[in-house]
Image (cartoon, grey):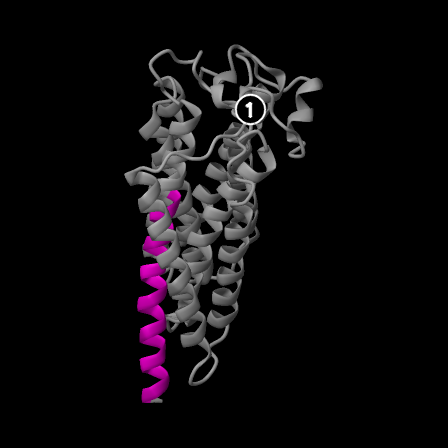
């Protein structure tokens, strides 16, 4: 029993450190991607997405890119150690399963880096963004799975409302990643409508196809970009309604109260950051913060589900 408890402590510490490193990877990756795209540049929006009109260039070696590589390498080594700690001296489930998925995801993202230099491949950009969220979620799930469940008897069962909220939040994150990968920020510069438009046009639905090679950033009022923005916002509104209601209900139970408070707080912060990002003319650090907060919100929702 003592050996098992010591193993659990080591797994928790490693997973917590890996979750922090994963969040840093999301932050640095978002900065590199958005800064390279020209978000919030001096002659905005004319400079946005200019790199799409030229052949792929080798990435410039700078302090931020060095930080990204060092952090990613350290995270990969920690993930290998985490899998080993989850399996020896005795397997810990489901922590070992989550740790193995995390390691596989890291290896897949490393392989994806072969194509990452060509920013015109929207699918590669989309997978990189979603992969960053996956790193945070899986590492946090390992940490949760290695903790004993407290007050399980007083915790409410998972409600349909909460599960629907998680689904709508996942859809919101996917659509947000599609906006970034498609360089569609400039298509919509107002809140809550999209330059006076409230519903996507028929031709705009083609923007949901990820298997395209971009020839340039989406134009202002581009139907595809407008569609992505509107769907992202409507999905976010549904997630706010469902998760907000589920979070308020969870406040009534001791086992879920702390996790519910974090979820409700991050929901409001994420909504505010999204609106400020658009109203500010897509400021670089606001957009980066919006992505990092989304990753933290996914982890907080995972905690609420676990409780």
Question: Looking at the image, which residue is at 35% across and 38% down?
Answer: 61
> Mark 1 Cα within 10 Å, few/some/many (few <14, many 20+)?
many
Secondary structure under tag 1 reads: helix
Q: Give residue 78's position: percent from left, percent from top.
A: 37, 64
Q: Give residue 38's position: percent from left, percent from top.
A: 40, 22
Q: Main secondary structure of the magenta part?
A: helix
Q: In this view, does 165 lie above or below 152?
A: above
Q: Nearer the viewer, residue 88 or 94?
A: 88
Q: In this view, does 250 lie above or below 29?
A: below
Q: Tell which residue pokes out farthest to the right in this image.
A: 202
Check the picture and name the quadrant holding the C terminus.
bottom left
Q: Give residue 199's position: percent from left, percent from top.
A: 61, 19
Question: Looking at the image, which residue is at 43% across and 67% down?
Answer: 80
Q: Does the magenta stretch include residue 18?
A: yes
Q: Give residue 42's position: percent from left, percent from top.
A: 33, 14
Is residue 238 visible to the viewer in this orientation of the structure? no
Q: Which of 276 and 247 is in front in this view?
A: 276
In the displayed structure, does residue 158 sit left or right of residue 212? left
Is residue 226 visible to the viewer in this orientation of the structure? yes
Q: What stretch is highlighted in magenta?
A: 2-26
Q: In this view, does 88 lie above or below 11?
A: below
In the displayed structure, does residue 42 sit left or right of residue 128? left
């Amino acid at each position: 029993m003592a050996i098992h408890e010591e193993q659990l402590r080591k797994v928790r510490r490693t997973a917590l450190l890996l979750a922090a490193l994963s969040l840093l990877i999301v932050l640095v990756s978002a900065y590199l991607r958005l800064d390279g795209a020209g978000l919030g540049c001096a002659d905005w929006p004319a400079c946005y997405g200019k790199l799409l009109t030229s052949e792929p260039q080798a990435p410039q070696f700078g302090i931020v890119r060095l930080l990204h590589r060092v952090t990613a390498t350290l995270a990969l080594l920690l993930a290998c150690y985490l899998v080993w700690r989850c399996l020896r001296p005795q397997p810990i489930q489901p922590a070992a399963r989550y740790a193995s998925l995390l390691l596989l995801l890291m290896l897949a993202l490393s392989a994806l880096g072969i194509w990452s230099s060509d920013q015109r491949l929207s699918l590669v950009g989309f997978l990189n963004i979603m992969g960053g969220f996956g790193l945070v979620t899986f590492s946090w799930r390992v940490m949760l799975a290695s903790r004993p469940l407290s007050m399980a008897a007083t915790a409410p069962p998972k409600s349909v409302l909460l599960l629907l909220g998680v689904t709508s939040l996942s859809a919101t994150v996917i659509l947000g990643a599609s906006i970034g990968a498609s360089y569609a920020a400039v298509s919509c510069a107002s809140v809550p409508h999209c330059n006076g438009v409230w519903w996507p046009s028929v031709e705009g639905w083609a923007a949901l196809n990820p298997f395209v090679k971009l020839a340039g950033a989406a134009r202002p009022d581009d139907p595809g970009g407008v569609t992505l923005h509107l769907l992202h916002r409507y999905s976010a509104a549904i997630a706010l309604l469902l998760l907000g209601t589920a979070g308020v209900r969870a406040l009534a139970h001791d086992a879920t109260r702390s996790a519910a408070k974090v979820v409700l707080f991050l929901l409001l912060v994420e909504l505010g950051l999204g609106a400020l990002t658009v109203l500010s003319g897509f400021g670089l650090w606001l957009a980066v913060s919006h992505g990092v907060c989304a990753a933290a919100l996914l982890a907080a929702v995972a905690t609420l589900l676990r409780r």
